[in-house]
Amino acid sequence: MLDTAPSQTVQLYDRLRAAILSLELVPGERLTERGLEASFDASRTPVRAALGRLDAEGLVQRDGRGWIVSPIDLAEIGALAELREAVEGAAVRLAVQRATDADINAVAALLDAARPANNTNADEEQGVRAGGDFHVELAALAGNHVMVDAVRGAMTRLARTRWLEVRTPAAREQAWQEHRAVLDALTARDADTAARLLTAHIRGTNERLLVALNADSRRLRGHGLAIVPDAPRPVPRR
Amino acid sequence: MLDTAPSQTVQLYDRLRAAILSLELVPGERLTERGLEASFDASRTPVRAALGRLDAEGLVQRDGRGWIVSPIDLAEIGALAELREAVEGAAVRLAVQRATDADINAVAALLDAARPANNTNADEEQGVRAGGDFHVELAALAGNHVMVDAVRGAMTRLARTRWLEVRTPAAREQAWQEHRAVLDALTARDADTAARLLTAHIRGTNERLLVALNADSRRLRGHGLAIVPDAPRPVPRR
DNA sequence: GGATTCGATTTGGTATACCAAGGTGGTGTA
DNA sequence: TACACCACCTTGGTATACCAAATCGAATCC
């Protein structure tokens, strides 16, 4: 049974989304419906539909009457990390109760397949994708699709920062090891350890990311990237 | 400075949303773009834009080629409660660190204004809205707009169930008291107590809701409401 | 020279015409 | 009577024309 060909709207959404996530369309760049219409050879109706979906995902946003590719917002990155700690931490605790060994092993197999050391021809994109997918797959073990959607949405909003982050082979290996440790604790049905390791991993990754972004923000801005600096907290720390 | 009049798309979105949340448009009801065009006296372009936004909110969904008002899904209600426990619990812990006394007092003032006992002419809708708003305002004290959006989205998806829930004056007073207790713990900067009280409140409210829905689901279905029964967990409990 | 005004152009918002696909009902035949 | 077939109609998908508002620039006036 063949699937019907995707509609133009879906194709356009996919292409626009890919262009944004790959930074081909630069954060902060102004988009016009008619410009996109010409660039992607479609009419305004599917262009508008695609923009609406991307708006809901947070990848584009309104700027006055027009549209811009969402800038990279350092405050939002921190906020997303806090959300992920809460949701993924709770999800892994639920997974300890609900996931079968087979479910866990399936995720472990995916993780092993993406191990940097094993991945001789690891292209950059594959590694980036695998890192984000792991967290979604892990959340899925909780059997709560709302939590999965929340994690997936957060990973989407964070996806572009992974290209900017300094990703040395050592850093990739560290991330892989931390993922592995979470799965081991999950296999051992040790909810406290699994949650502690996972939240520490999220927090640590976020801190390394912020350091890298702050160090490079001037250079990145020089390439035309709009990066919104970390605004003072609306509610001050006591 | 007067705001410009809302565009037709926004007006249509608001009206459609209100019709869905008030159950004027029944869960499971089939919607056609041309039918809505006639009902709301607008053309298909804004109708499609409004449907797209409501789709992102989870209030309508695709059904084959067409659209339906999202059915009330008992599994999703439980999943949303789990997400709320995670996010709101984490948010109140952050609020203990970050919110000023003035911020907390402002939320307390809103809560007092909505106290059922004080509210002589409390119409049903006002009470419903106040209950949902409290949780959003509370989350806002964490100073994390991503968490606020997550809580707001969850409350939106749950909003229709509040009309179905049995809401006696005693139940309303109990909810108010539990809200008040959370704020008191927050004022005392007792993070553990605040989080414990809040998650217990969310869980208890959810359990009472599920009991009421299960008891009444046959009657409700008789009124044309599509209620999706609780599906077996995709990942079984151990 | 600088500010201002006015008009051409560009923009998103809206309405609508056209299309292909899917569904429905009726009719004719075995 | 039951089934098959076909015409029609409704549906969402798409393209496009038109509009009002905002923007940009040039020409003009002080």
Image (cartoon, coloured by chain):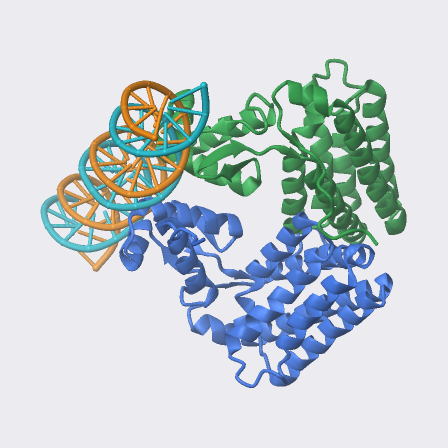
Chain colours: A green, B blue, C cyan, D orange
Which of these two is toward me, B101 or B83?
A: B101
Q: Quadrant of residue D20?
A: top left
Disc tally is: 0
Which quadrant does the N terminus of chain A fall into?
top left
Q: Quadrant of residue A10?
A: top left
* Residue A221 locus on image (x, y percent): 66, 23
In this rendering, is residue B81 above or below A110? Answer: below
Which of these two is toward me, B172 or A122?
A: B172
- Which residue is the extreme one toward the top? A121
- The answer to whether residue B201 is visible is yes
Q: Residue at x 64, y 56 (%)?
A: B151
Which quadrant does the C terminus of chain A fall into?
bottom right
Q: Residue at x 86, y 27 (%)?
A: A174
* Residue C24 locus on image (x, y percent): 25, 53
* Residue A47 locus on image (x, y percent): 41, 32
Q: Residue at x 63, y 85 (%)?
A: B117
In this rendering, is residue A178 above or below B186? Answer: above
In this rendering, is residue B15 above or below D29? Answer: below
